[in-house]
Amino acid sequence: MLEIKNLKKNFGKKKVLKGINLTIEKGELVGIIGPSGCGKSTFLRSINYLEKPSFGHILLDGIEIRDNDKLRLMRRRIGMVFQQFNLFSNMNVLDNIIFAPVTLNIMSKESAIKKAREMLKKINLLDKEKFYPNELSGGQKQRVAIIRTLLMEPEIILFDEPTSALDPEMIGEVTNLMREIAKTKMTMIIVSHEMHFIKNFCTRVLFMDDGKIIEDGSSKEIFNHPKDERLKTFLSKIKNI
Amino acid sequence: MKKRIILLISLLCFLITGCNEEKEKLVLATEASFAPFEYYQENNIVGVDIDIAREIAKELGMELEIKDVYFDSIINEVKTGKSDIGAAGISYTEERSREVNFTINYMDAKQVLVIRKNSNIKKIDDLFKKKIAVQLGTVADDYLTSNYPNIEIIREKKFLAAIEDLIDYKVDGVLMDEIPAKELLNDNLMILDEPLVVDHYGMVISKNNQELLDVCNKVITRLKEEGKIDEMLLSHMGITTKKDNKSLYDKFYDSIIYDSRYIFILEGLRNTLIIAIGAVILGVIIGTTMAIIRNVHDTKGKFKILNYLARTYITVIRGTPSILQLMIIYYVIFKTSNVSIILVGILSFGINSGAYVAEIVRGGINSVSEGQKEAGFALGLSYLQVMKHIVIPNALRNILPALGNEFITLVKETSVGAYIGIVELTKASDIIASRTYDYFFPLMIIALIYLCITLVLTKIFAKIEKRLNHVRN
Ligand SMILES: Nc1ncnc2c1ncn2[C@@H]1O[C@H](COP(=O)(O)OP(=O)(O)OP(=O)(O)O)[C@@H](O)[C@H]1O
Ligand SMILES: [Mg+2]
């Protein structure tokens, strides 16, 4: 269970997150939507302390995530997938995937390689294991990045616009993989502008605006019966496109 | 690992102390391009001054060690105790005698004007408004400066360069000591009859060493009485190869093969490479450490004092010429210790290069995308793990071209090592030219060697770059 209590974040004088309260249960598929600049990424990055909260608390199963000696252990439990993939460009596909679990002694190199290969096989990238990131397409990179996160066996995975840097024909590859992961009862929090995907995939959707959560409900409630005016405007703008 | 450290330390000790000595050494500083007083013959430094110094060493029961440095470094060598005696046809002057003690004079030397045979200078009075070349810091230099305000003085580092200027019509005359002047006369050069001034050669000794001065004076007095000094002078006259109209092949032969002169070039090459490689390794270690200190400070706010020190180091080193750093390290920091000059070279150039490498590496670290670092942190990796396995390898790839440039610059920079007496490539060409009176071949060959080193380095770096960029064939 992930609890967020009165989370605030300022960049200098600028208030970006203005008090967020939220509880996410295990296995929930949470989508976060909202206009550009409203603080979605900042919120997501605060959860694993890539951004240091200015105020408030974040707890995973009752343990606070903050800058102490437990931080790295907590981060292992929370995976993160980035818009720009962020594969390590000095390592090939296989090394990208096994580097962290092997370095952190979570598993032996042999079993890490074995697991990585199983996963690469599932997404048809086994033949690319010796390739370097600059030799892969965007969709391939993002799927490798997701597998890199999966190998750490996290309890929650955060996705910050995982498909928005991809060509349309590659979006499916990534969302299909996310669907596969959802079947394992993984808790997933996804920031995305792919409204169709959020609508069909997520069990719960949050609408953020101006650093706050404005509406929080099931996918149906948010998309079919929006209550707040700002959400209505937001959705109508998207439909117009 | 331990074994390697022990090996390294013993190597360092060896370098610092030099080979273990049996006999006590009397160290003589000279500039061996002043025949017949000191010059190279078959890779040994010989000459009148050397003969006298040997007599002194014999008197003391010591072994003579000769150090070949630039003329204007000799007084410093003696003052700082790096050498015991300085002898290079050094004329007595008030100014010098304030810095060091002079022995009694062992030779009178006329300062004469060397001119081209077709020159329109016929007597001293014709010098008015002419260009005259001298060797920097010599008596000739002092004399002209204080007595002939209307002469334009060209100060060359070596009198051979002054002679080159004369041959090339860049100057109208060269004022220098008579005896070496006689050694280099050829079909086109002559000495003006009138001597300008007569001065007296003495050897120089530290003011703190009265004992040595007494022994030197005793030996010189004896040699003078026995007429030995004139004998020595005779035995060293007229043996230099003269320039005149030699064929290109003869010049090449004289420069490289005669007297095994290529050995200087090989020795120079060896020293240049040892210093450059040592300095590169040291520079990379220092530079990377500095860059990491600065990065930790900038990103995490730690290491305030270390960061301040690192910044000061970088500013000071980048803000001063490397030759000054070399001289300061040698003459000030290692003033009293008997450290090998090669090691001083490695240290000095390494410290110099470290400052540049630090800034290159810092730029490289900053060039690695935040995203990759964040991905590392998000996986639970520590700052050090992210640095070591992700940031540094990527930074290295980004900075390789700049690093390659720095290494190439460093190789060429080592040529100033000659100032503290290191026989590196440039000095090797100087030594050969001082014997042949011809700069062309030695300089060309040295230039070619530098070029080859640079080309090889460029090739190697291109290869590494290709590797790191994972270019597949
Ligand atoms: N490091 C930072 N320093 C200062 N301001 C920042 C920083 N990061 C984000 N901001 C500001 O915080 C606000 C929220 O940014 P954030 O990236 O969280 O928005 P977002 O909702 O993810 O937008 P988008 O949909 O465009 O990705 C923006 O106004 C942004 O300019
Ligand atoms: Mg964003």
Image (cartoon, rainbow, N blue to C red):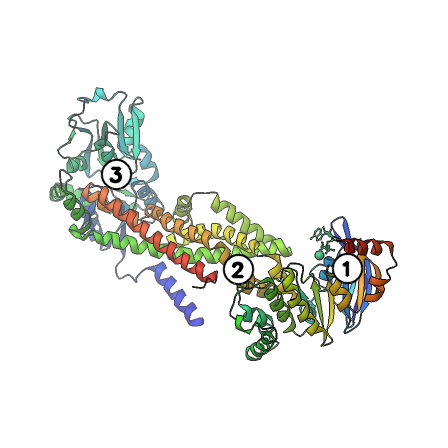
Q: Quadrant of the C terminus of chain B?
A: bottom left
Please state which amino acid type lies under the numbered disc 1. Answer: Ile
- Determine if residue A61 is in view: yes
Query: Does dot 2 land on a helix, a strand or a loop?
Result: helix
Q: Quadrant of the N terminus of chain B?
A: bottom left
Numbered disc in front, either 1 or 3: 1
Q: CA distance from mark 1 to mark 3?
A: 87 Å
Chain letter for mark 2? B
Label 1 Cα crowd, 10 Å radius (few <14 / some 14-19 / many 20+)? many
Q: Name the residue carrying label 3.
A: B90
Numbered disc in front, either 2 or 1: 1
Query: Does dot 1 land on a helix, a strand or a loop?
Result: strand
Q: Name the residue carrying label 2.
A: B394
Q: Name the residue carrying label 1.
A: A33
Q: Is residue A82 above or below residue A183?
A: above
Name the residue located 20 percent from the left edge and 50 percent from the top edge. Answer: B256
Chain letter for mark 3? B
User: Is residue B314 shown left or right of residue B190?
Assistant: right
Numbered disc in front, either 2 or 3: 2
Residue contact at pointers 2 and 3, CB within 8 angstroms: no
Badge 2 and badge 3 both on one subunit: yes
Please state which amino acid type lies under the numbered disc 3. Answer: Ile
From the top left corner, tell me how far across and down residue B148 is, in percent: 29, 23
Please state which amino acid type lies under the numbered disc 2. Answer: Asn
Numbered marks: total? 3
